[in-house]
C-alpha cells in the first residue's frame, strides 16, 4: 500500500532564480504518441538523434567493459578518453574536460564563472540551456537575434558585445536553425569579444557542417588566441551515442579545465560511456558514412518541403527549422496523431516553427507527406 507523503512548504526554500525557470522540453513521450496515434509505429524526430546508429566497434567495446562488471566506479578523470581526444585533435590532454553530454559542461562553466548580475550574451533563436544555466546562477542574459533571413547579424553582435559580457555562448552551427557562421563572421565576433570574457563555442553539430568548405573549425580558428575560450563538442549527434551521454570541451588553458574539475561531480561520465566514445572516435569510416547520408537527406527533404511552399532554413546539421505558417503546437499535435514527434518551437517570435531531425529516407518521406498535408489544410 502506498502511503501519502506529508505536505511540505518546500516552495519557500527554492531560490527565486530557480522558481522562475521553464522546464527543459525533451519532446513528446513516444509511448503517449503511440497511444494517441492508434498504435502506429512512432517516428521520433524531436531530439536530433542519428538514425544510422553508432559504430559497430562501440557495441564490442561496451560489451568488453561490462564483462569486467559494473560494481566499480569509472575512471574519474577519463584519462584514456581525454588522451584519445587530445591525440586526435593535437591538443594536450590536460586541456580536455569530459561531461555527461556537452550540456553538462555548459552547466559547469556557469557554476565556475558566473556571479549574480553578470551578463551573458547568446543568440536567438537558440538552445534553451544557453539561457537557463546562466539564469540559475542569477546572471542576466542578452539574446542577439538573427537577420530576417536567419543569417548571422555581425553588427548586432558587435553592439551586444560592447556591453561587456562575462560569458559568450556562440553555437556553430546553431540549434535550432541549423545555420552556420562563416570563417569571416567568426573572426569578426571573436575580435569584438572583450578580452576579459570567456568565449564558449558550442560545436555540438560541427561534424555535420565540416563538409561545407565555408565552415570554420572552431578549434583551429581559436588555437593560439590570447584570451580565454573553450570549444564544446559531443558524441551524441554524429557519432550516435546519445544514449550514453558523452561530451567534451577543449580549452585555451589547463587552468580553466582545473576550475571545471572543481565544480563537477567526480564520476560524471560512466565507464561504458568512456569506452564507447573511445571506440567511436576511432571509426572514421562510420562517421563519414553518417555525415554523407545525413547531408543527402537534408538536401532532399529541404527541396521537397520548399516545393510544397514551406519556408525551410538552410541547414548544416541533421535537423531542419521549418515555418509551418501557424502555431507550431497545433501542428505538432496533428503530427502526433500520425505517429510523428517533432519539437514545437516556443521561443518568442518563432512560435510557428518546428524543428525536425531527419531519420531514414523512408521515415522522412512519411514526415514530408504528413506535414505538407497538415499545412495545406490552411490554404485549401
Image (cartoon, grey):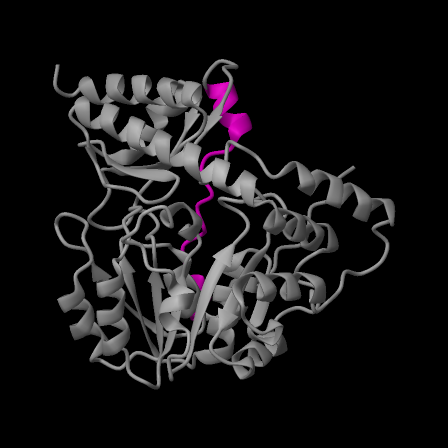
Residue 127, image quadrant: bottom left
Q: Nearer the viewer, residue 332 or 272?
A: 272
Identified at 69% across, 46% down, the residue is: 4
Percent from the top left, x then y, of residue 30? Answer: 52, 29
Percent from the top left, x then y, of residue 246? Answer: 59, 54
Residue 21 part of the magenta segment: yes
| Residue 160 visible to an observer of this rendering | yes
Identified at 80% across, 48% down, the residue is: 65
Q: Magenta span covers which residues?
A: 16-36
Percent from the top left, x then y, of residue 126? Answer: 32, 54
Identified at 49% across, 36% down, the residue is: 289
Percent from the top left, x then y, of residue 376? Answer: 19, 18
Q: Nearer the viewer, residue 157 or 184?
A: 184
| Residue 49 visible to an observer of this rendering | no
Residue 155 horizontal side relative to residue 139, left or right = left
Residue 259 horizontal side relative to residue 274, left or right = left
Q: Nearer the viewer, residue 167 or 209?
A: 209
Q: Nearer the viewer, residue 277 or 175?
A: 277
* Figure check: 377 above or below 123: above
Residue 239 horizontal side relative to residue 188, left or right = right
Identified at 43% across, 32% down, the residue is: 293
Residue 147 part of the magenta segment: no
Count of numbered labels shown in the rendering: 0
Q: Quadrant of the C terminus?
A: top left
Q: Quadrant of the N terminus?
A: top right
Amino acid at each position: 500500500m502506498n502511503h501519502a507523503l506529508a505536505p511540505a512548504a518546500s516552495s519557500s526554500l527554492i531560490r527565486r532564480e530557480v522558481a522562475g525557470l521553464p522546464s527543459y522540453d525533451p519532446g513528446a513521450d513516444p509511448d503517449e504518441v503511440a497511444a494517441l496515434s492508434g498504435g502506429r509505429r512512432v517516428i521520433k524526430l524531436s531530439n536530433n538523434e542519428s538514425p544510422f546508429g553508432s559504430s559497430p566497434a562501440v557495441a564490442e567495446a561496451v560489451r568488453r567493459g561490462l564483462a569486467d562488471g559494473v560494481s566499480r566506479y569509472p575512471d574519474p578523470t577519463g584519462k584514456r578518453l581525454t588522451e584519445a581526444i587530445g591525440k586526435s585533435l593535437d591538443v594536450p590532454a590536460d586541456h580536455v574536460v569530459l561531461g555527461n553530454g556537452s550540456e553538462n559542461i555548459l552547466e559547469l562553466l556557469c557554476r565556475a564563472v558566473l556571479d549574480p548580475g553578470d551578463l551573458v550574451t547568446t543568440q536567438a533563436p537558440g538552445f534553451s540551456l544557453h539561457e537557463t544555466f546562466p539564469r540559475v546562477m542569477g546572471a542576466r542574459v542578452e539574446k542577439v537575434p538573427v537577420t530576417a533571413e536567419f543569417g548571422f547579424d555581425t553588427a548586432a553582435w558587435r553592439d551586444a558585445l560592447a556591453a561587456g559580457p562575462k560569458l559568450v555562448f556562440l553555437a556553430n552551427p546553431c540549434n535550432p536553425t541549423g545555420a552556420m557562421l562563416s570563417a569571416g563572421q567568426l573572426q569578426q565576433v571573436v575580435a569584438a569579444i572583450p578580452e576579459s570574457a570567456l568565449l564558449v563555442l558550442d560545436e555540438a553539430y560541427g561534424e555535420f557542417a565540416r563538409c561545407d568548405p565555408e565552415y570554420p573549425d572552431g578549434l583551429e580558428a581559436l588555437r593560439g588566441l590570447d584570451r580565454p575560450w573553450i570549444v564544446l563538442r559531443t558524441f551524441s549527434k554524429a557519432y550516435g551515442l546519445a544514449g550514453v551521454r558523452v561530451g567534451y570541451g577543449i580549452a585555451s588553458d589547463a587552468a580553466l579545465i582545473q576550475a571545471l574539475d572543481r565544480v563537477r561531480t567526480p564520476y560524471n561520465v560512466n565507464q561504458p560511456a568512456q569506452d564507447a566514445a573511445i571506440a567511436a572516435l576511432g571509426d572514421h569510416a562510420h562517421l563519414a558514412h553518417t555525415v554523407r547520408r545525413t547531408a543527402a537527406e537534408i538536401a532532399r527533404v529541404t527541396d521537397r518541403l520548399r516545393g510544397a511552399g514551406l519556408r525551410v532554413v538552410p541547414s548544416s546539421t541533421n535537423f531542419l527549422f521549418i515555418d509551418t505558417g501557424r502555431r507550431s503546437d497545433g501542428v505538432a499535435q496533428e503530427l502526433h496523431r500520425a505517429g510523428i514527434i517533432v519539437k514545437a518551437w516556443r521561443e518568442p517570435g518563432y512560435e510557428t516553427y518546428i524543428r525536425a531531425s531527419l531519420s531514414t529516407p523512408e521515415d522522412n518521406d512519411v514526415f514530408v507527406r504528413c506535414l505538407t498535408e497538415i499545412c495545406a489544410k490552411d490554404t485549401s
